């Protein structure tokens, strides 16, 4: 696979792990030491980053609620599922903060709530709250709770504070509670809307939802914020992960005048 087929490093490593798992865990016949085998390493690639004008053009081509989600991805540096799993109590308008619970690595963090998003987010939450009241009147209005919280607080799933900021448009049956509830908005809804907006804006970059998070970090560094602050906002465990965005500090061709321009 490594020599004859142009496959990614992750595919090569998965092919190595598969027979080892088969023999060790299924057949009960240890395959033997595989530590000496060469494992493929993924090359470091610079992330795709949008300019502020490109972000503005893409967001303008999106409709709600996907547009509001995209504004939070860029304005707060959230991952897509982090934004969709936001609960009402995790948005602090008074402190202009968003608390991300159980993010990547099951860690909590605090990030910024952009002031430009506040009016639209408040209007959105007013609509969600009205929908929640209607659901309660119909015997629904329940939401899934983290861990075993539902056993400790049996009625917490009906409370406004625990509701999703971006609820689904349809009910479904929660098998654990045996009640009708709304899941959060599915990620494919936002991903599809973003792809269509990229095409509609005429953008030539291979952008996707996570590109907004890359752009958030890059634009913060460009604005002069220190890398440790950006690391905390992104929730990176190691600052070396955040350092991939420091390519913007090396201005490269932006600070060099091409000799062709002097002909």
Image (tube, rainbow, N blue to C red):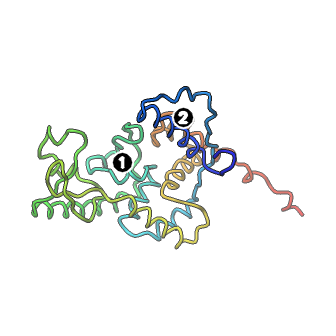
| Residue extending farthest right | 263
Mark 1–mark 2 Cα distance, whole angstroms, equals 24 Å
Residue 259 position in % (x across, y down): 86, 57
Q: Where is residue 75 drawn, in percent x and y?
A: 45, 53
What kind of element bears circle 2?
A: helix
Q: Which residue is mark 2?
A: 239
Residue designated by label 1:
96
Sequence order check: which comes first, mark 1 or mark 2? Answer: 1
Asked whether 101 or 5 is in front, the reply is 5
Describe residue 1's horizontal placement relative to residue 230 as left or right.
right
Numbered circle sitting on residue 177: none
Say which element carries label 1: loop
Residue that appears at 58% across and 67% down: 203
In the shown orientation, is residue 163 left or right of residue 54? left
Residue at (54% x, 34% y) in the render: 239
Q: Is residue 136 above or below residue 156?
A: below
Residue neighbourhood size for the residue with mark 1, other residues' Cα within 10 Å, grouped as few (<14), some (14–19), many (≥20): few
């Amino acid at each position: 696979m490594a020599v004859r087929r142009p496959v990614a490093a992750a595919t090569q490593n998965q092919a190595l792990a598969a027979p080892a798992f088969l023999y060790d865990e299924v057949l009960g016949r240890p395959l033997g030491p595989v530590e000496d085998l060469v494992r493929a390493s993924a090359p470091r690639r610079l992330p795709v980053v949008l300019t502020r004008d490109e972000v503005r053009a893409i967001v303008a081509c999106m409709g709600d609620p996907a547009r509001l989600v995209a504004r939070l991805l860029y304005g707060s540096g959230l991952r897509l599922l982090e934004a969709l799993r936001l609960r009402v109590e995790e948005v602090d308008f008074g402190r202009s903060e968003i608390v991300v619970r159980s993010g990547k690595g099951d860690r909590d963090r605090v990030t910024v709530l952009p002031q430009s998003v506040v009016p639209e987010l408040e209007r959105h939450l007013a609509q969600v709250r009205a929908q929640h009241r209607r659901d309660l009147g119909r015997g629904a209005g329940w939401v899934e709770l983290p861990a075993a919280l539902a056993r400790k607080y049996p009625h917490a799933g009906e409370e406004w504070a625990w509701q999703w900021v971006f609820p689904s448009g349809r009910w479904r049956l929660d098998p654990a509670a045996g009640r009708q509830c709304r899941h959060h908005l599915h990620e494919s809804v936002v991903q599809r809307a973003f792809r269509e907006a990229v095409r509609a804006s005429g953008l030539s970059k291979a952008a996707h939802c996570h590109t907004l998070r890359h752009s958030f970090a890059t634009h913060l560094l460009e604005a002069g914020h220190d890398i440790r602050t950006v690391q905390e906002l992104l929730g990176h465990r190691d600052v070396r992960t955040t350092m991939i965005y420091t390519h913007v500090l090396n201005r490269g061709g932006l600070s060099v005048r091409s000799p062709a321009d002097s002909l």
